[in-house]
Amino acid sequence: MAAQILDGKALAREIREGVREDVARFQAETEVQPGLAVVLVGDDPASRIYVSNKERACQAAGIYSEEHKLPASTTQSDLLDLIGRLNRDPRIHGILVQLPLPDAIDEGAVLDAIDPAKDVDGFHPVNVARLVLNQEGLRPCTPAGILELIERAGTPLRGAEAVVVGRSNIVGKPVAMMLLHRHATVTLCHSRTRDLAEVCRRADVLVAAVGRSEMIRGDWIKPGATVIDVGINRQADGSLRGDVAFDEAVQVAGAITPVPGGVGPMTIAMLLVNTLTAAHRQVGAPAAPAGG
Ligand SMILES: NC(=O)C1=CN([C@@H]2O[C@H](COP(=O)(O)OP(=O)(O)OC[C@H]3O[C@@H](n4cnc5c(N)ncnc54)[C@H](OP(=O)(O)O)[C@@H]3O)[C@@H](O)[C@H]2O)C=CC1
Ligand SMILES: Nc1nc(=O)c2c([nH]1)NC[C@@H]1CN(c3ccc(C(=O)N[C@@H](CCC(=O)O)C(=O)O)cc3)C=[N+]21
Ligand SMILES: [Mg+2]
């Protein structure tokens, strides 16, 4: 029997509609409109697509958004100045600096400069520490979206074998930590992992965040497993492929996310949730938003 398809686009739409209602209520109570600033340095075409998706989603949810497009030649000190201004700007509750940054800019120095209260990506060291300590803080959007999808699949995590392929700071490591906090037994794999296929076959929940088109084959998947495909791999013809060979995997898995229409839309929905949560915490409004 073919797997249940986890429709991230539909779930993201539901979440964004909930955010829209919560934003309206928040604004009525506080007279403050939540605001997001997105900073894009250089002209990476893929980043431009995400940035315009984010902008449209903000508008639909009633969140103020502004886009700061800087040339690739921008210096680190100019970027730090901009972040300082956004940190002090009362209209702005969330700041997102699109990654990767040009080589001449020290990514760590830039992330350190963002006010942790406005760090809607959850990449500042303070928010990373709060995640590891399982304390309240802003959680990275893609991992948060992945957890929502797993929950929607009805997959129990307590005691489950979870295998994450990829150990980046923005996806692999934080999603592994979130699965651990849900009491899964977590294996975090990377390019030096031996017998990767064998490790994947143990997984009740498999998260692929590698960036290699269709690397994970159908026979790497345990029958009935929940498979989350984070990969966004642009093909020569312009289409997108995931890190999982979908046509094979869908025959074996219990539930699987498509690419596109899986994790990607959830990332944007969780960015809106984080922006509203950040606004609540900064304004100190009485009621907390759903999911915040
Ligand atoms: N849908 C969404 O919202 C998002 C999608 N993405 C997509 O997800 C994918 C991963 O992104 P990101 O985490 O930033 O990627 P990175 O390139 O930062 O990390 C890739 C990871 O995969 C590991 N890896 C590479 N090759 C292999 C291999 N042959 N076997 C096992 N592990 C391997 C690397 O190992 P090592 O550490 O040893 O080098 C590394 O840990 C990309 O396609 C990206 O576009 C990313 C963010 C959000
Ligand atoms: N500071 C920072 N935060 C990020 O969250 C961040 C980043 N930098 N750099 C790049 C990655 C990648 N990323 C995606 C977001 C949305 C889609 C998305 O909307 N995907 C849709 C459509 C994609 C398309 O058609 O091109 C889908 O999968 O269905 C994909 C990928 C966020 N990232
Ligand atoms: Mg993110």
Image (cartoon, rainbow, N blue to C red):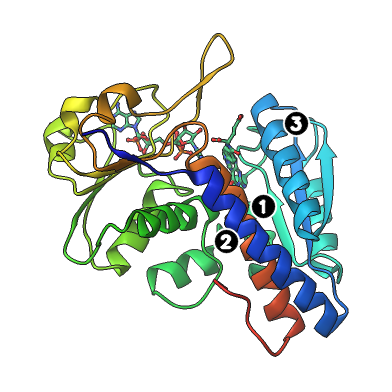
Identify residue for label 2: 124
Q: Quadrant of ligand 1?
A: top left
Residue at left offset 64%, top offset 65%: 18
- The amino acid type, in three-letter code, at marker 2 is His
| Element class at badge 3 | loop
* Foreground of the two, 33 or 138: 33
| Element class at badge 1 | helix
Q: Nearer the viewer, mark 2 or mark 1?
A: 2
Quarter assignment of residue 99: top right
- The amino acid type, in three-letter code, at marker 1 is Val
Q: Identify the residue at the far bottom of this view.
A: 286
Q: Is residue 14 above or below residue 117?
A: above
Residue 119: x, y in percent? 64, 63
Q: Is residue 280 above or below residue 275?
A: below
Identify residue for label 1: 110
Q: Is residue 256 left or right of residue 31?
A: left
| Element class at badge 2 | loop
The quarter in which the C terminus is drawn is bottom right
Quarter assignment of residue 250: top left
> Does the closest atom of ligand 2 sit within 8 Å of the Cβ of label 1?
no
Label 3, label 2: how far apart the Cα atoms are: 22 Å
Residue 207: x, y in percent? 32, 43
Identify residue for label 3: 42
Residue 43: x, y in percent? 75, 27
Label 2, label 1: how far apart the Cα atoms are: 9 Å
- The amino acid type, in three-letter code, at marker 3 is Gly
> Does the closest atom of ligand 2 sit within 8 Å of the Cβ of label 3?
no
Task: Say whether disc 3 or disc 1 marks the residue closer to the N-terminus.
Answer: 3
Residue 180 appears in the rendering: yes
Residue 165 appears in the rendering: no
